Amino acid sequence: QVQLVESGGGLVQPGGSLRLSCAASGPIFSIYAMGWYRQTPGKQRDLVATITSGGSTNYGGSVKGRFTISRDNANNTVYLQMNSLKPEDTAVYSCNVRGRLTTGDFISWGQGTQVTVSS
């Protein structure tokens, strides 16, 4: 019932920037938190950043100071600004949304968007 549409991935050179976005739609009553996670083949999914409805943020250690998460509550959209990208940031980035429908709580994942950092 809740759909997430991600955009903004792609190929970028080391030191470059990308901005990811994720828009949630559906019969959403409220959103508790939105975030981004990333995964490379053979490894577990890792936290990149999360943001609550009140604006509190949490970042994975390897991205602190380089990535910034923000959200547009009116449009149920979360953004991830990624600066000073490194080859080790290469991964599939997935959006995660936790919230409430009229029927109960939900957790939804986006389909994932590939970010490749390479010269």
Image (spheres, rainbow, N blue to C red):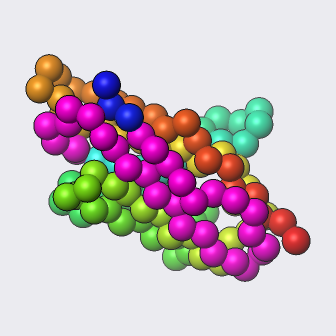
At 38% from the left edge and 49% from the top edge, which residue is drawn? 23
| 107 left or right, relative to 18 | left
Position of residue 35 relative to residue 63, above or below, is above
The image position of residue 37, as x and y in percent, is: 53, 46
Marks counted in the figure total 0
Q: Report which quarter residue 49 is drawn in.
A: bottom left
Task: Kindly tell me whether residue 64 is visible in this rendering.
Answer: no
At 49% from the left edge and 38% from the top edge, which residue is drawn? 110
What range is drawn magenta here?
A: 4-32
Position of residue 27 relative to residue 62, above or below, is above
The image position of residue 2, as x and y in percent, is: 33, 31
At 32% from the left edge and 62% from the top edge, which residue is drawn? 71
Magenta segment's dominant SS is strand
| Magenta span includes 21 | yes
Identify the image quadrant of the C terminus: bottom right
| 98 left or right, relative to 68 | left
Identify the image quadrant of the N terminus: top left
At 37% from the left edge and 57% from the top edge, which residue is drawn? 78
| Magenta span includes 79 | no
Task: Kindly tell me whether residue 93 is visible in this rendering.
Answer: yes
The image position of residue 34, as x and y in percent, is: 35, 49
| 91 left or right, relative to 64 | right
| 102 left or right, relative to 23 | left
The image position of residue 104, as x and y in percent, is: 17, 22
Query: Which residue lies most toward the top here?
Result: 103
